[in-house]
Image: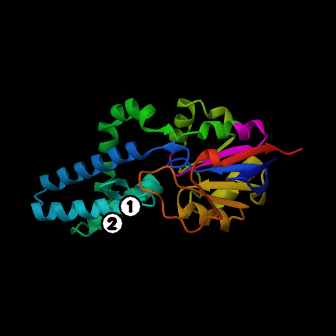
């Protein structure tokens, strides 16, 4: 148990902190931009090979960018690619395909084929870029160390895969600070409040004794519905500042949070 304070204001005692990963602990935007562009390019290539006109390709590209949250400045922090799981991104892509006269079964199969193809083609590049593209955000490691030393249980709750979360933690020496993981592979996944309950049960924590820190309103609403004591929004993880409304407090930099072991 420890005292948590933000910009000199005491938030109270906590037993655990649940962290989102992408855009909260991890600087994931460069990798996700590369993934969005690769998927869009492959989709346009496939539709062109099927005889789609230039006009159709332009319409398709615009819809895909809007659905993924790909904008000129990078990614929209609350867009599908930034927030949702791979499966949810696949379903949104298949839905767009239906607007171009594909049946749902056809659209779903095509989306799966394209996502798998992009994963395969870019697997080596992604692995090589992982350390630079998914680095911890500034001072996040120091905060995790402070929490760990104060006896606070830390966990990651993310819509990345369990493998992706573990790889990020391992690559950057964060594994020793993290006691539990709840991923897109677990049921239910974010933003179902049951994800918070499942993770807290795994950690033997009561949600009312915990803080949850995330960069999206879906995270913060989930936290509050699950009975989390402190729903904290983090806004420094993206080129474009997230527009959050469901937070109790906002964190602009990890150094604004201070931890003191309870006596």
**Residue depicted at x 61% and y 64%:** 247
Inter-mark Cα distance, 1 to 2 = 6 Å
Q: Which residue is mark 1?
A: 91
Q: Residue furthest right?
A: 263
Circle 2 SS class: helix
**Res. 106 visible in picture:** no
Q: Is residue 55 left or right of residue 133?
A: left
Rendered position, 197 above or below 125: below
**Res. 151 visible in picture:** yes
Q: Is residue 242 left or right of residue 92?
A: right
96 or 8: nearer the viewer: 8
Q: Which label sits on residue 120?
A: none
Rendered position, 66 above or below 186: below
> Do the residues under discs 1 and 2 have CB atoms within 8 angstroms?
yes
Q: Position of residue 240 (x, y in %)?
A: 42, 56
Q: Which residue is mark 2?
A: 95
In the picture, which quadrant includes the C terminus? top right
């Amino acid at each position: 148990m420890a005292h948590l304070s933000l910009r000199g204001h005491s938030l109270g005692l906590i037993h655990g902190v649940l962290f989102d990963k992408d855009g909260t602990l991890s600087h994931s935007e460069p990798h996700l931009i590369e993934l969005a562009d690769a998927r869009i390019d492959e989709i346009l290539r496939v539709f062109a090979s099927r005889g789609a006109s230039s006009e159709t390709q332009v319409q398709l590209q615009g819809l895909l960018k809007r659905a993924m949250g790909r904008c000129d400045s990078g990614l929209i922090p609350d867009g599908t690619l930034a927030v949702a799981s791979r499966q949810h991104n696949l379903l949104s892509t298949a839905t767009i395909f239906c607007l171009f006269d594909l049946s749902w079964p056809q659209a779903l199969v095509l989306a799966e084929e394209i996502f798998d193809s992009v994963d395969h083609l870019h697997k080596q590049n992604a692995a090589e870029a992982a350390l630079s593209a998914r680095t911890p955000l500034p001072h996040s490691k120091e905060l995790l160390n402070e929490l760990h030393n104060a006896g606070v249980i830390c966990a990651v709750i993310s819509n990345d895969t369990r493998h992706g979360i573990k790889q990020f933690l391992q690559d950057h020496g964060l594994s020793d600070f993290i006691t539990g993981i709840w991923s897109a592979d677990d049921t239910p996944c974010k933003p179902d409040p049951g994800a918070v309950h499942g993770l807290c049960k795994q950690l033997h924590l009561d949600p009312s004794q915990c803080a949850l820190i995330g960069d999206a309103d879906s995270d913060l609403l989930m936290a509050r519905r699950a009975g989390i004591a402190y729903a904290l929004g983090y806004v420094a993880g993206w080129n474009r500042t997230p527009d959050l409304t469901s937070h109790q407090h906002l964190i602009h930099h990890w150094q604004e949070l201070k931890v003191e072991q309870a006596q």
